[in-house]
Amino acid sequence: MLSNLAIIAVLILIVSTTILIVLNQWRWVSIAWVFQVFCVFWLTSLSWSIIESAVKLIGGWIAIAIVSSANPDSILEKDETSVIPGFGFRFLSAGMIWLLVFSIAPVIQDFIPARIEIIWGGILLFCSGLLQAGLAKNLVRTIIGVITFISGFEVLYAAVESSVLVSGLLAFLNIGLAWLLVYFHTNPMEGVDL
């Protein structure tokens, strides 16, 4: 049943990655991140069994819970002078990612024999993760961008190979990055602005 409605997962990914790139409030970012993790589970379940894909879901939600425990501020980036121009630039960048994803997906599908929805989702997560990490002004956005990038790899890798070991390793990497964020968020080093 999930395979017939896979385009919905891609549409939810478009909205959630755009929210992660554009918005600045932790509540919206965390909600979008939850939906993104669910869509990663959805797209990997097209290639793997539900039980193997559940590792992505549980590992991602544990990472979200760990990051949420660090009590990030309600506003992630406190630079109020550039909120409006920053919003427009980020939204325009997200739109350019959509165009890039939908234009190169058929070429990638020649190399990775998978459903087009999996290719769209994986490339969308790759590109938006890079953009999030590149535009980040603080550690929270950087780590979320890196985890988003890794999620894109997870979606594309699931279409190529079925490996429980790699799935567990990537889930461990997501949780480890979340713990790293908590460590640096609660114990900032002297002289370093996080």
Image (cartoon, rainbow, N blue to C red):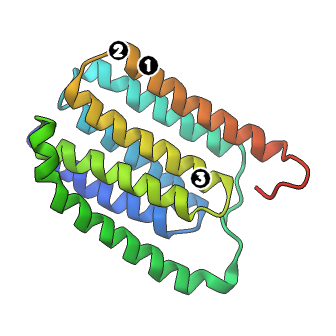
Please state, as top left, top right, bottom left or bottom right, where the N terminus lies in the image.
top left
Q: Position of residue 125 (x, y in %)?
A: 36, 50
Helix, strand, or loop for circle 2?
helix
Please state, as top left, top right, bottom left or bottom right, where the C terminus lies in the image.
bottom right
Q: Please report contact status of discs 1 and 2: CB closer than 8 Å, yes or no.
A: yes
In the picture, the disc for residue 164 is: 2
171 left or right of 38 in image: right
194 left or right of 110 in image: right
Mark 1: give few (<14), some (14-19) or many (20+) Cα within 10 Å: some
In the picture, the disc for residue 168 is: 1
Q: Position of residue 157 (x, y in %)?
A: 28, 30
In the picture, the disc for residue 142 is: 3
Helix, strand, or loop for circle 3?
helix
Task: Determine the residue positioned at 80% across, 58% down.
Answer: 193
Q: Position of residue 161 (x, y in %)?
A: 24, 22
Three-letter code for the amino acid on which mark 1 is drawn: Gly
